[in-house]
């Protein structure tokens, strides 16, 4: 309360109160209040146990926490440019961020996930990758946040046992909904990441089940159906000079959201594809028509 008493700036529109605060040394912080949270404090423990084990340029830093009875608060580094959804769902998203910055943000998110899946002391599956949980610092460097649904597993563990689904509608991998599609693993985060990529390209939410106009059709279906056409990316404000960036982001996104996790790439493979030259576009097309 001392940290936030002189500041009442509300940050974001999440399910919990996030308020701007200031430490005694002058650093700005974001304080997340979890009063009366569900699950007997499970989300609070999840955040402290998971994000407290991390240290990476693309993962938001947890400075500390406060716990007094049922009152719970988490203190994070302050991210002055807010969350990614604030930009990609705006009226002119490409004018605000630009394609090259969007591309850099996409790579940064992938590197953050690769760290969680393969380089952290304990493997962490996030289970809630979405634009609202990608925060941007003063240089628009992306940082993955909100580990309330995260699950820790042993480094060599390839599949996870869990009861029920977790995540946000529109970003939850099919196997998290139903085990009939396959096993739940780090590739479940890859699916969510693919949906984020497509929303970055399309500039709108993908959860709209009924579209009033053909241009509002569910974007993954729309882009898949029209990718072979000459005007495939015009609706996404793509010009010839940045076409390669948009094509690669779109193809990687489609590769990540295939129905069966068996066909999802690992996040390491995604990073490799981003770092490859233009020849990777043909490789990605082969993955989709296989």
Image (spheres, helix red, strand yellow):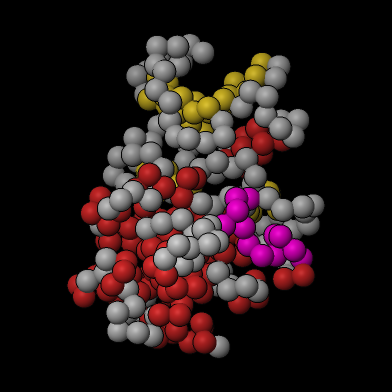
Q: Position of residue 136 (x, y in %)?
A: 37, 44
Asked whether residue 169 is drawn in magenta, I would say: yes
- Is residue 79 toward the left or the right of residue 237 in the image? right
Q: Position of residue 236 (x, y in %)?
A: 32, 66
Magenta range is 167-179
Q: What residue is rendered at 45% in x and 84% in y?
A: 285
Q: What residue is rendered at 62% in x and 73% in y?
A: 259
Q: What residue is rendered at 27% in x and 53% in y?
A: 92
- Is residue 167 toward the left or the right of residue 40 in the image? left
Q: In this rendering, does residue 16 appear at all?
A: yes
- Is residue 88 toward the left or the right of residue 132 in the image? left
Q: Position of residue 193 (x, y in %)?
A: 51, 60
**Would you place residue 251 above or below residue 60 in this image?**
below
**Would you place residue 47 above or below residue 289 in this image?**
above
Asked whether residue 170 is drawn in magenta, I would say: yes
Looking at the figure, which quarter contains the C terminus?
Answer: bottom right
Q: What residue is rendered at 45% in x and 80% in y?
A: 225
The residue furthest left is: 241
Looking at the picture, tell me which residue is in the foreground, 244 or 240.
Answer: 240
**Would you place residue 47 above or below residue 153 in this image?**
above
Looking at the picture, tell me which residue is in the foreground, 102 or 48.
Answer: 102
Rendered image quadrant of residue 227: bottom left
Q: Main secondary structure of the magenta part?
A: loop
Q: Position of residue 47 (x, y in %)?
A: 61, 37
Looking at the picture, tell me which residue is in the foreground, 204 or 118.
Answer: 204
């Amino acid at each position: 309360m001392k940290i936030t008493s002189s500041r009442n700036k509300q940050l974001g529109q999440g399910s919990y109160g996030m308020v701007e605060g200031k430490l005694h040394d002058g650093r700005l912080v974001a304080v997340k209040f979890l009063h009366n949270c569900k699950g007997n404090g499970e989300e609070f423990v999840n955040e402290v146990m998971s994000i407290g084990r991390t240290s990476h340029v693309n993962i938001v830093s947890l400075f500390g926490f406060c716990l007094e009875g049922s009152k719970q608060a988490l203190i994070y580094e302050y991210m002055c440019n807010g969350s990614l959804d604030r930009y990609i769902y705006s009226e002119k998203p490409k004018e605000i961020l630009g394609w090259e910055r969007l591309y850099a943000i996409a790579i940064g998110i992938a590197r953050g996930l690769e760290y969680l899946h393969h380089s952290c002391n304990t493997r962490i599956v996030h289970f809630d990758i979405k634009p609202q949980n990608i925060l941007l610092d003063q240089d628009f460097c992306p940082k993955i946040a909100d580990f309330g649904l995260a699950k820790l597993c042993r480094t060599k563990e390839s599949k996870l046992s869990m009861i029920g689904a977790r995540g946000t509608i529109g970003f939850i991998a099919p196997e998290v909904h139903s085990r009939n599609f396959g096993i739940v693993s780090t590739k479940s985060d890859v699916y969510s990441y693919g949906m984020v990529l497509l929303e970055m390209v399309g500039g709108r939410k993908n959860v709209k089940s009924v579209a009033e106009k053909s241009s509002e059709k569910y974007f993954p279906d729309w882009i898949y159906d029209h990718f072979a056409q000459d005007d495939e990316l015009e609706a996404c404000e793509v010009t010839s000079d940045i076409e390669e960036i948009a094509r690669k982001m779109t193809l990687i996104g489609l590769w990540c959201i295939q129905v069966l996790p068996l066909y999802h790439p690992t996040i390491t493979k995604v990073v490799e594809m981003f770092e490859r030259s233009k020849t990777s576009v043909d490789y990605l097309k082969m993955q989709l028509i296989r």
